[in-house]
Image (tube, rainbow, N blue to C red):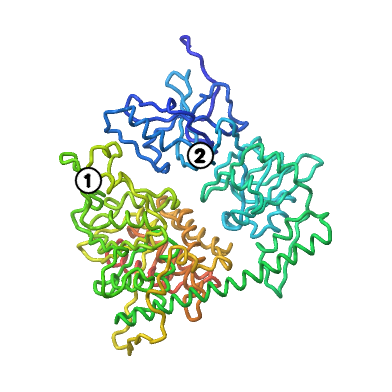
Amino acid sequence: MGGHIMLATINEGKQDFKMVGYLASRDDLDITAKGSLRARLYPSTDWPESIDITNIPHQMSMIINNNYHIGFTDDESSSDPEQRKDIAFDYLKNKWFVTTPSFNYSDSGDRLFLNAFDVEVLPQNPGTEPSQVWFTRIPQFSVVDEYNRPNNQYEFEDALLKGKVLGNVVPWPADASEAPRSVIWKNSDVEMSFYVGIEKQEKTTRGFAYFPKNGEKIRRVGITVDDTDWLSNLLTLRGKDVMYVPQDIVLRYEKRASEFHPQRVTNTETNITDKQSENITISEDNVEEAKIGKQVTKLDDTIMKSTVKSDLNNSKQSRFIQRFIQQTDRMGLHYNVKDLINFHTAMESNGLVILSGLSGTGKSKLVSAYATTLGIADQKTLSARLCFVPVRPFWADDSDLLGYADTVNSVYRPGDSRLVETLLAADKDPNNLYIVVFDEMNLARVEHYFSQFLSVLELSSDSRYVQLYNPQLSNRLYNQETYPSRIKVGSNVLFVGTVNTDESTFQFSDKVLDRSNVISLHIVPFNQNFKNAPASENEDSMDTMKMSTEDYFNLVDKNNAKPLTSEEKSLLWDIHSALNSKDRNLGIGWRIVQQIESFLISLPDIENGVSRGEAFDLQLVQRVLTKVRGSEELLRDLIENGDDGILVKIFDNNKTISKFTESRQIVQQKARELKLYGFTM
């Protein structure tokens, strides 16, 4: 072979597992021949058994600007490579990197390259020496993460012990040799069960099944809020099915595990949920009678406190909705009450809320009424916490919105929309809410001028930053103390857009629709008898109703949260399969599933309000059907004449979930557009 040494074969490309790594020092940063900043990461997890590690490089190469989820952008235009390394290391140090490894051979086959893709970062605990930490991958299951699988801990444990399929784990290699030693059932972030003693796995089209060593049984240990060594050191990514826990901690908990029998606990008098009852089933079988009695008493106390808190939260939520309705009346505005509840719920569930409708239907006024109800603004004076941004048709990138660094005059020049000033104020005032309204949002292409925010809104509140200018310019700008190079966008900033649908506007791209609740306001009949609500003398003043960020998000009754049911998830899967079969770019991603669930959890439980079935119907309209657009050839089978298509048949087969009134109307509208124009937008 001409002197070349051929390496043992490893499948090229991205792998079906994740690795955890870390950046050891500044010396592990370099500039590639193409001018890109590269970080070389040391792995902190074992390679899977199916990977021949003989010739694998010791470090994973990560091109900084190819991994936008890390929350940092390198300035490749800089002429100072050492400063680029300093800035990057200052941000990337003390972080864990969870990455998808990718292998590539050189053309001659005598060299193997190891690259890091899809990188996400998590903070290290203070004082961590990363070279001394080695993580174990553990598949995790829960009631909300799997499609049509065990719905509670009892069903999960029963299936686990019987060797039945538990569901899919992504990412996880399917090879039989890659069985995990343990799995997790997760009730919440601070309550889970750890199952050990697994030796084999089987992968089917429906997911994984696990089996213990011959002659042995799978054992279990409960993990609660008191197990701080486990909870404070684990790594987990939102929407992923794998948890990473330091090996020494895993070994410690393996020794505590004991045999168990699945127990179904119900109590109709107190209406104990599966999740609450698992506090009992987690205890060991040989626990003393007195300990059981003490635990049940503690559970009763917990239920009583939860009930009181639930009533209190419902009262706050109901009271806020009532004030919101009264505020719109006082302002002489007329909306469908269900639209008001829909808007409030979408705002609570975070992300971007877009109000659509005819010009003059009061979209901007609705946001003003909402801000007034929250105590952010009033009708008489302007408020720095409510920022209206009139979108200009010529906006082409975020510099039109945020401003730019004027290097000639050594000054940063913010945009004239007040957005930068509002974000700076919000960053310094995290206890108070701020609302940013993009008026006539689609006069310019949203994915162009709003691009940074679209990426930022996907991240956790601690990692959301927008960059104003290259940080290397900071020392050259006179006003860099007033306008730093980047601004944090906290959870106290709520984003709303208003749009008109006419020939002067642009359509939204899928990237925008994936991150938005698009609400079409209903017009109330003109001949309806309206009575403006007078201000009551004993009504709370606006000063006493000013709501902090914490108060606002605590309106949601977390103790009575109702996530997506298996039937609802099955329906979403059926719709996804129908859409995806017509176009691989159509469908329902995990982000949308999670955001629909967040909306349903935030839904106020109010008499004569929006029912769960109506809310689910609204989410299909606002999160899924907005993306159903294209030619007659593509969509004919899906929507037919509006009554005979695949989508309507799916609705008909799931009448126990909802009547799908709004969704049916949208499908009929799209069917008419297909008939008239041969396509639908």
Q: Secondary structure at mark 1?
A: strand
Residue 123 x, y percent position in the rendering: 50, 42
Task: Name the quadrant containing residue 307.
Answer: bottom right
Name the residue nearer the viewer: 340 or 587. 340
Report the mark closest to the observer, 1 or 2: 1
Q: From mark 1 to mark 2, how far is it between C-alphas?
A: 35 Å
Residue at far top of view: 3
Residue 673 or residue 518, whichever sits in front: 518
Q: Place residue 499 in its image quadrant.
A: bottom left
Going from N to C along the chain, the mark reached first, 1 or 2, is: 2
Quarter of the image for the C terminus: give it.
bottom left
At mark 2, the secondary structure is: strand
Q: Nearer the viewer, residue 187 or 96?
A: 96
Q: Amino acid at mark 1?
A: Tyr
User: Where is residue 238 shown, x and y percent of the image?
Assistant: 51, 50
**Identity of the residue drawn at 38% across and 37% down:** 66
Res 377 → quadrant: bottom left
Q: Residues within 10 Å of mark 2 (few under 14, many from 20)?
A: many
Q: In the rendering, at what x and y percent does residue 267 appear?
A: 72, 71
Residue in the picture at 41% in, 28% down: 29
Write down the residue under mark 2. 98
Residue occupied by mark 1: 412
Q: As drawn, is 649 to the left or to the right of 566? A: left
The amino acid on which the numbered mark 2 sits, given as a three-letter code, is Val
